[in-house]
Image: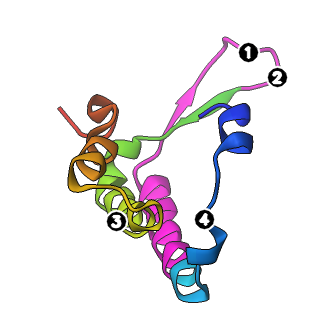
Amino acid sequence: MKQNDIKTFPIPLSKLTDDVIAEIGKLYVLYDQDAERNEITRQTAAYSETKQIKEYKMMNARDFAHKIDGLICPLYALTGEEREFSKNYEIEFRVND
C-alpha cells in the first residue's frame, strides 16, 4: 500500500475494541516471528553502503495474514465474496510455488 492509501483509508474506530486490537497484536507478533524465521540474508555489492540484504518470504506467513484478515474484514462488514477477494488479492505473492 502507498502512504496516501493508508492516510485516506477509513478505520472503523467504533468497532475496533480493545479485544480486537489485542488479538490483532498477538497475531501480528506471530506473523512477524514467522517472517523473521523464514528470512534469507543475501550478500550484495549492488549498494555502496549495504553489504547484505534480508529477503522476506511473506507467503510463508500467510496463515497468520489470513487470521488477521479474519479479524479485520468483519470491522468493515464485508460480504463473503469481498472477504475471499481480500484473502486472495495478489495470491501469487502470498503462497509458495
What number is the disc on residue 49? 2
Q: For marks 3 and 2, give the CA distance.
A: 40 Å
Categorize mark 2 by other alpha carbons within 10 Å: few (<14), some (14-19), many (20+).
Answer: few
Cβ–Cβ under 8 Å for marks 1 and 3: no
The percent coordinates of residue 11 (x first, y second) are 63, 59
Left or right, 31 with respect to 9, comes to left
The residue lying at 47 percent from left, 67 percent from top is 75
Categorize mark 3 by other alpha carbons within 10 Å: few (<14), some (14-19), many (20+).
Answer: some
Q: Give the mark toward the camera: 1 or 4.
A: 4
Residue 90, compared with residue 14, is above or below; it is above
Q: Secondary structure at mark 2?
A: loop
Q: Which residue is mark 1?
A: 47
Cβ–Cβ under 8 Å for marks 1 and 2: yes
The percent coordinates of residue 58 (x first, y second) are 41, 44
Q: Which residue is mark 4?
A: 12
The percent coordinates of residue 69 (x first, y second) are 38, 59
Q: Which residue is mark 3?
A: 70
The residue lying at 38 percent from left, 57 percent from top is 65
The residue lying at 61 percent from left, 32 percent from top is 53
Q: For marks 3 and 4, give the CA distance.
A: 15 Å
Q: Give the mark toward the camera: 3 or 2.
A: 3
Left or right, 55 with respect to 7, comes to left
Q: Secondary structure at mark 4?
A: loop
Give whichever of discs 2 and 4 has the lower sequence position: 4
In front: 65, or 32? 65
